[in-house]
Amino acid sequence: MSLAELLGISVPILQAPMAGVQGSALAIAVSEAGGLGALPCAMLAPDAMHKELAAIRARTDRPFNVNFFCHHPPEPDAARDAAWRERLGVYFAELGVDPASIPSGPGRLPFNADAAAVLAAFRPPVVSFHFGLPSPDLLERVRGWGAKVLSSATTVEEARWLESHGVDVVIAQGLEAGGHRGMFLSEDLNTQLGTLALVRQVVQAVKVPVVAAGGIADAAGVAAAMALGAAGVQVGTAYLLCPEASTSTLHRAALASEAARVTAVTNVFTGRPARGIVNRAIRELGPIDAAAPAFPQAAPAMGVLRAKAESLGRSDFSPLWSGQNASGCRAVPAAEVTRELARGCAR
C-alpha cells in the first residue's frame, strides 16, 4: 500500500506542522490540494484547539494531521531561571523591559488527557508527534478511533524505537529542517544527520513507510527523496510565505532576504535545539547557550524581549524558524506550492 493510500490523500506531500506561524487555514488549503495539511497543537489550549478543529471540519472533508509535542516538562529550577534572566539582563535594560513582566507557565504543553478528550470529539484521521510518543494509554486512545500515527526520528535508533512502539509512518527529519529538532533518545547534536544520509539509512532499517523531511523545497527535492526510498515528503519552510500562513511581517521579510541563507540550530529561544535564521539573539547568545533553561522554560523571558523588539520593527529576538533551503518560499497560495511539489512524485 502506498503512503497516499494509507493516509487517504491524493499525493504524498505532507505539510509540516509549524506552531506559531500557522493555524487551520494552511492545513485546509494543503488538504484541499490533495496533500496532508497539518494543525500544530503544542501551543493551543483546549478551547483554541476545539475552535481550529471545528474550522477544519467545516471547510474540508479531506484527511488532515493534528500534531503534538511529547516532551517531559522539566522540574522547576528557580536558580537556573534566575541565571537566565541575568544573562538577558542587558537586553531588558536596553529595551526598557521589566523582568517582572515575564509570564509564568511553559507556553508549550505535551500531549495529555485534556488534548485527547478534545480530539476524541473530532476523530482526526492522522495524529503525529514530535519528541517521541505519548504514554501507552494516551496512544491507545488515539488509535481507538482508527487514527494513523506518525512521529519524527532524527537517527536510525529513533526510527527503530518508533517502529517497535507501533507507529504507522516514520518521519525522517534531517538536520536541514527548520524548527525544533525531533530528537528524543539523545541530546547530542553530533548524532544528527542530513536528510539524504538519514533517509536512506532509515529506509533500510525499518519496514514502515518513511517520509523525508528537511531541505526539500521543490519538485526536484521531492524526486531526490523518493529516489532514496522515501514514501513521501514533509515540507514546512516552502509554505511560510503563503497567504494562508500566519507568518509575521518581520519573519516574511527575513525569509525573502539574503538573511535566509544563513541558519543555525539554536536553543536560545526555547531551551531545545531548533533551526532558524541567524539574528542578533543567536549571534550574541548562542547558537547553543548552556545557560538556557530546559525546554520550554527558556521561552517566556525571550518572549517579552521579542514582543518589545517587534513593536519597534525589529526581529532581534524573534525565532525566525526556517530550514536551510528557503529557495522554495513564494508568496503564492498553498495549493500552488503543493501542486509544484507533487510534480516531483512522478519523476
Image (cartoon, helix red, strand yellow):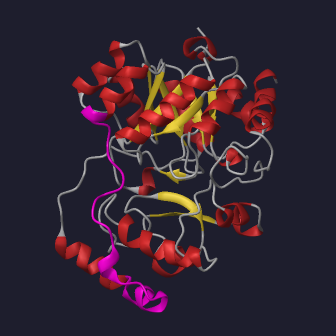
**Which residue appears at 22% of the width and 56% of the height?**
74
Question: In the image, is residue 107 part of the stretch drawn in magenta?
Answer: yes
Q: Residue 292: x, y in percent?
A: 34, 70
- Drawn side of residue 4 relative to residue 301, left or right: right
Looking at the rendering, in which quadrant would you find the N terminus?
A: top right
310 relative to 125, above or below: below
Tell me: residue 246, above or below residue 98. above
Which image quarter: residue 188?
A: bottom left
Q: Is residue 303 left or right of residue 132?
A: right
Magenta segment: 88-114
Residue 17 image offset from top left, x and y in percent: 54, 40
Counting from the top left corner in percent of width and height, residue 299 is at 38, 65
Question: Residue 118 or 288: which is nearer the viewer?
Answer: 118
Q: Is residue 8 visible?
A: yes
Quadrant of the image containing the C terminus: top right
Q: Extreme top residue here?
A: 1
Q: Residue at x 33, y 13 (%)?
A: 144
Residue at 18 percent across and 67 percent down: it is: 77
Check residue 138 for magenta coloring. no
Which residue appears at 65% of the width and 55% of the height? 324
Q: Is residue 15 visible?
A: no
